[in-house]
Image: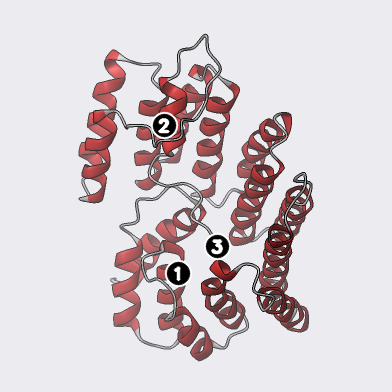
Amino acid sequence: MKAAIALIPAALFALAAAPAHLPAQTPAATPQQPDYIHRGQQLMRQGRLDDALALYRTTLKSSPNSVPANIAAGIVLDLQLQGDPARQYFAKAIDAAYTPELKAVAQRMMAMSYAFESDCKKTAEFEQQVFDYYGTVKNFSQQGEIANEAGRVCLESGDFDAAHHWYQLGHDTGLKEPNIPPARQDLWEFRWESAQARIAVRRENQPDAQKHLAAAKSILEKGTNPEQTPFLPYLDGYVAFYAGDYKTALAEFQKIDQNEPFIVCILAQTYEKLGDEDKALELYRKASTAILHNPGTAYALPLAKKKLASLQN
């Protein structure tokens, strides 16, 4: 599990700051955000999405072709579940991008916009464009990351065949990295087994889910990717939840960082299944305030708001 996109990707600012006639390069240091982006993100963290959007729109009045400002406005609208107007800004960012890499950033944001509507097909359409860009620069690792991102959106959108396709593509492409270290090979194998376990349990194929779960654990037991170990409770909990073992799911999810929107939302669902409506409501409220623009929030935010409307009536 990985939060692939933060509020606004830092690489965007380095690319947007580069002169149009020079090839964009990401500097070693983290690029400084424009002041309006910094202020807008502060407003978003305070829950003042309307104010953040007004700030970005003010910036766009004087700089209508600003890629960061168009993306920032689109993100806020997605968080308000206003996909159509959000995508108008992302489309403007794509058109205004003056380097292939900057265009890929904007296309990825467009893909996430469709993820907020559980639209696997349209998400995959734009992720494919990003995937193709990274292929032109032979960045196989990033291609794998993008494919996995599409796979996760499709899985949570309920298109299990598409999810399998994208996860397998991510695994196969990631392994093309030249001189790939053994630890990286193990990482891609772990991710693939994890994906297959989740797809299998969603297909109600419990034996296959357990087989791939065991394989994922076996890879981690090699000790080559210790940083992945904290994700095991997520995988165990996910498989248990969709197998209907809610007590086990609860025990596993409680071991994980309670600030990741997807975890907060699936934990809320677990409490709801166990009959604890008060705890479920508490967690749905928390998930409904998420401000990341990534697959986890794209799943959690619309569901949490829908659940709040249903449970509070």
Report if the CB atoms under discs 2 and 1 are less than 8 Å apart.
no
Q: Which residue is mark 3?
A: 1
Image position of 5 with respect to 311: above or below: above
Image position of 117 with respect to 226: above or below: above
Q: Is residue 63 left or right of residue 147?
A: left
Q: Which residue is mark 2?
A: 71
Three-letter amino acid code of the residue under disc 1: Ile
Task: Point out residue 239 in the picture as x, y percentages from the top left corner.
Answer: 62, 78
Q: Which residue is mark 1?
A: 263
Question: Which residue is pictured at 49% across the width and 90% down the height?
Answer: 247
Task: Point out residue 89 in the picture as x, y percentages from the top left corner.
Answer: 43, 28
Question: Which residue is pictured at 24% across the width and 29% down the height?
Answer: 35
Task: Point out residue 135 in the picture as x, y percentages from the top left corner.
Answer: 73, 34
Three-letter amino acid code of the residue under disc 2: Ile
Q: Which quadrant of the figure has residue 83? A: top left
Q: Is residue 82 left or right of residue 122?
A: left
Instruction: Identify the mark nearer the N-term, 2 or 3.
Output: 3
Count neighbours of disc 3 (C-alpha within 10 A) and say few if under 14, some if 14 to 19, many if 20 or more: some
Task: Point out residue 149 in the picture as x, y percentages from the top left corner.
Answer: 60, 51
Q: In the current view of this chain or complex, which residue is farthest to the top?
A: 21
User: Looking at the rendering, in which quadrant would you find the N terminus?
Assistant: bottom right
Q: Which quadrant of the figure has residue 154? A: bottom right
Helix, strand, or loop for circle 3? loop
Mark 2 vs mark 3, CA separation in Å: 24 Å
Helix, strand, or loop for circle 2? helix
